[in-house]
Image (cartoon, rainbow, N blue to C red):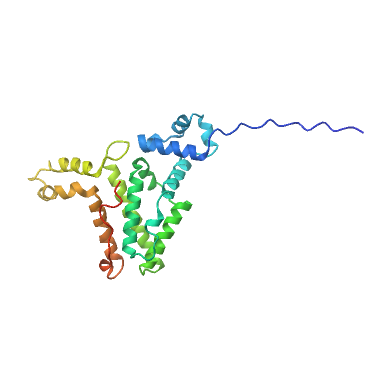
Amino acid sequence: MRMSAPAERRRPGPRRALAENDILDAALGLLDDGGPDAASVRGIAAKVGVAPNAVYTYFPDKASVVKAVVERLLGGVDHDVFADREQPWRHRVESLALELRAHLSAHPGAVGLMIGGPMDGPNALALNERLLQLLSDAGLDSIEAARASYLLIVYVFGSIALEVADVHQAGPLPPEAERITARRRVYSATPTDSFPRSAAAAATMAGFISTEQYLWGLRRILDGLTPGGAAQVPRVREGAGES
């Protein structure tokens, strides 16, 4: 009786030297330091000390890294600040808007990525679900709530993106007061003879990136969402949630 040849032993494959979180940490660090263009696959690989192919083991391309970074950031949003259904709905919307502004403006290099593609991951969907529940509590039907949630997301993310774009350098945002002062210097030079209305509004325009303006616009939107909405108080203190 012939004995079968012993099965060939396979060599163990190469051990993975990093984890997905290492890649996302590196990507977010590059975005924070260098802006949206800094987080290339090659740059991420260099930051974690591996070859680019090692990154592709976890993510097939840069777009998938970006999507995972967006999910990571949305996962850090504190739902507790707006999930209490005992609180007035307007208060909860303002709390959410301030939480998003503070959380996302802490990573300005990633803000442009938030609006660069569909936010359809689990954390994005969970945030939208909370917002739809909140708007349902305000008395909106399912269609109105969906439209209102889109309006609010456009306002919040658009405002944050414009605020970040106003700073023409990579890295953390300077304090709000410093940015307003810099804008005031620019707008104070508006020629009064050619642009009298703009010159007269210079101080107000300088504050367009302020928390006060952010809440002013948000409250005007909320005023129009439901009949009598403007009368529902209290409102969140304006200084809360600043980065």
Whether residue 10 is situated above or below residue 158 in the rendered picture? above
State the residue at coordinates (35%, 62%). 148
Residue 25, given in percent of the width and then of the height, sits at: 45, 38
Please indicate, yes or no, whether residue 59 appears anywhere in the rendered image. no
Residue 123, given in percent of the width and then of the height, sits at: 45, 52
Whether residue 174 is situated above or below residue 207 in the rendered picture? above
How many labels, in total?
0
State the residue at coordinates (15%, 48%). 203
Give the quarter of the image for residue 231: bottom left
Give the quarter of the image for residue 2: top right
State the residue at coordinates (45%, 55%). 125
Residue 46, given in percent of the width and then of the height, sits at: 46, 29
- In the picture provided, is 60 more to the left or to the right than 77? right
Q: 238 or 17: which is nearer to us? A: 238
Quarter of the picture holding the N terminus: top right
Whether residue 47 is situated above or below residue 115 in the rendered picture? above
Give the quarter of the image for residue 112: top left
